[in-house]
Image (tube, rainbow, N blue to C red):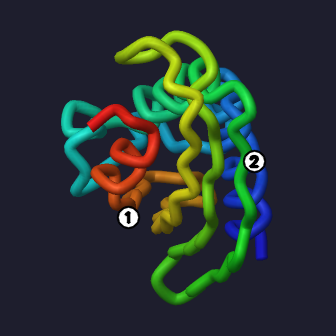
């Protein structure tokens, strides 16, 4: 149960754009990140990803998520979170504000080690989201 509680606190800090300072207490030193998404190709650590999310929410200023499922596999020390992110491009970013909105589904597979987040994989169709925003 402790991993599930830690994962919830980590998820909340991460997906509300609180950045690394808020995520760090829930993570193991050197916590890693992976995704098969071009937009995240250069991101290898949870520190980098948490700062990317923080930056994203300065561009999609109304960004929010709807959590659909949150489940733990204690034997494998994994927690899965399934959610939909919604945000409208209202400020800054890779192109001038488009005013377009994305509603994009994603899954986080969060792996634990000694009660801390050691690795997270994001499963996400970034091409779909970027196209909705008018970025790709």
* Picture residue at 67% right of the left edge, 30% below the top: 17
- Asked whether 67 or 32 is in front, the reply is 67
Of the pair 36 and 87, the residue shown nearer to us: 87
Task: Please give left or right for residue 100 compared with residue 129 in the image.
Answer: right
Between the residue at mark 2 and the residue at mark 1, the CA separation in whole angstroms equals 18 Å
Give the secondary structure at mark 2.
helix
Using the rendered view, name the quadrant where residue 91 is placed: top right
Horizontally, is 2 left or right of 37 in the view? right
Quadrant hosting residue 90: top right
Q: How many marks?
A: 2
Q: Could you tell me which residue is drawn at 52 percent across and 89 percent down?
A: 75
Query: Could you tell me which quadrant the N terminus lies in?
Result: bottom right
Disc 2 or 1, which lies upstream in sequence? 2
Residue 43 seen in the figure: yes
Numbered label attached to residue 12: 2
- Circle 1 residue: 123
């Amino acid at each position: 149960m402790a991993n599930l509680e830690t994962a919830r606190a980590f998820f909340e800090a991460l997906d509300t754009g609180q950045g690394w300072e808020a995520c760090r207490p829930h993570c193991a030193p050197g916590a890693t990140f992976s995704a098969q998404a071009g937009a995240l190709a250069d991101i290898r650590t949870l520190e980098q990803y948490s700062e990317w999310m923080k930056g994203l929410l300065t561009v999609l200023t109304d960004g929010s998520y709807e959590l659909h499922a949150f489940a733990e596999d204690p034997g494998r020390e994994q927690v899965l979170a399934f959610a939909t992110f919604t945000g409208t491009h209202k400020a800054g970013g890779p192109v001038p504000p488009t005013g377009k909105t994305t509603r994009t589904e994603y899954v986080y597979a969060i792996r634990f080690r000694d009660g801390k987040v050691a690795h997270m994989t994001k499963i996400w169709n970034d091409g779909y989201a970027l196209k909705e925003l008018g970025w790709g």
